[in-house]
Image: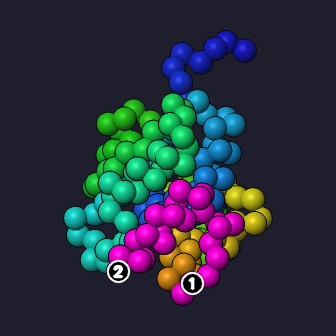
Amino acid sequence: MSPRARPQLAIYPGSFDPITRGHEDIVRRTLRFCDGVVVAVSHHATQLKHGLFSVGERLELIQQVFDDDERIEAVAFSGLLVDFARKREINLIVRGLRAVSDFEYEFQMALMNRDLQPGIETLFLAPDARYSFLSASLVREVAALGGDISAFVAPVVQKQILQKLGEQ
Ligand code: ADP
C-alpha cells in the first residue's frame, strides 16, 4: 500500500458545552483511522440559548482534555459546516451516534451536507456503551442538582463545571 499523499483529517463538529467522555471516546476512535481530528465548536450568532461555557472556554477545555496532543485541533466555526470543511479542505465529517433518537436528525444532516457539498461524507461512530446515553446537557443538569459527574467528564472539566455553577 502506498503512503497517503496528505494526512487524512476529520472534522468533528458539535457544541461541546462542555466536552464529555462520550465526545472524547469518539475523537479517540476517529484517530484509529485518521491522522488528525479538528474538533469544531459551532457558535451561531443567532443562537438564542446560551450555554454554560463560552466558546473560548469550550475550546480551552478541549485542549486541556487532550493535553495538547498535536493530532487534535480545537477551533470555533460559524456558518455552514460544509463551508468550514471546504475552507479546510477536509471531506470527512465524524459524528457520534448514541441511542436511536440521534439517528433521524443525524441522517437528515448528513444528506443535507452532502447535497450542499457533493464529495463530503459523514461517518457515524458508536461510543463505548458506558457513554451511549450521555449528553453534555445531562451532565450540566446532574451537576447543577449536586450529582456526581466524575465518570462522565475529565477531572479538569468537572472542576470547571463546579466552579461555573458556583458563580451562578
Ligand atoms: P451533546 O448532545 O452532548 O450536547 P454535541 O452537540 O456537542 O453533544 O454533539 C457533537 C457530536 O457528538 C454529535 O454527533 C453527538 O451525537 C456526539 N455525541 C455527544 N455525546 C456523545 C456520546 N456520549 N457518545 C457518542 N457521541 C456523542
Residue 8 covered by magenta stretch:
no
Amino acid type, callout 2: Gln
Q: Give the residue displayed 23% in from the left and 69% down from the top.
A: 46
Q: Give the residue displayed 69% in from the left and 37% down from the top.
A: 32
The image shows residue 15 at horizontal and vertical percentages of: 43, 62
Q: CA distance from mark 2 to mark 1?
A: 14 Å
Amino acid type, callout 1: Gly
For the residue labelled by badge 2, is the local secondary structure a helix, a strand or a loop?
Answer: loop
Q: Nearer the viewer, residue 87 or 52?
A: 52
Position of 128 with respect to 3 (left or right) is right
Residue 4 visible, this orientation: yes
Q: Residues within 10 Å of mark 2 (few under 14, many from 20)?
A: few
Magenta segment:
145-168
Q: Establish if 157 lies above or below 62.
A: below
Residue 66 position by quadrant: top right
Numbered badge on residue 124: none
Q: Which residue is mark 2?
A: 168
Q: Which residue is mark 1?
A: 146
The image shows residue 53 at horizontal and vertical percentages of: 37, 66
- Sequence-wise, which precedes: disc 2 or disc 1? 1
Residue 111 visible, this orientation: no
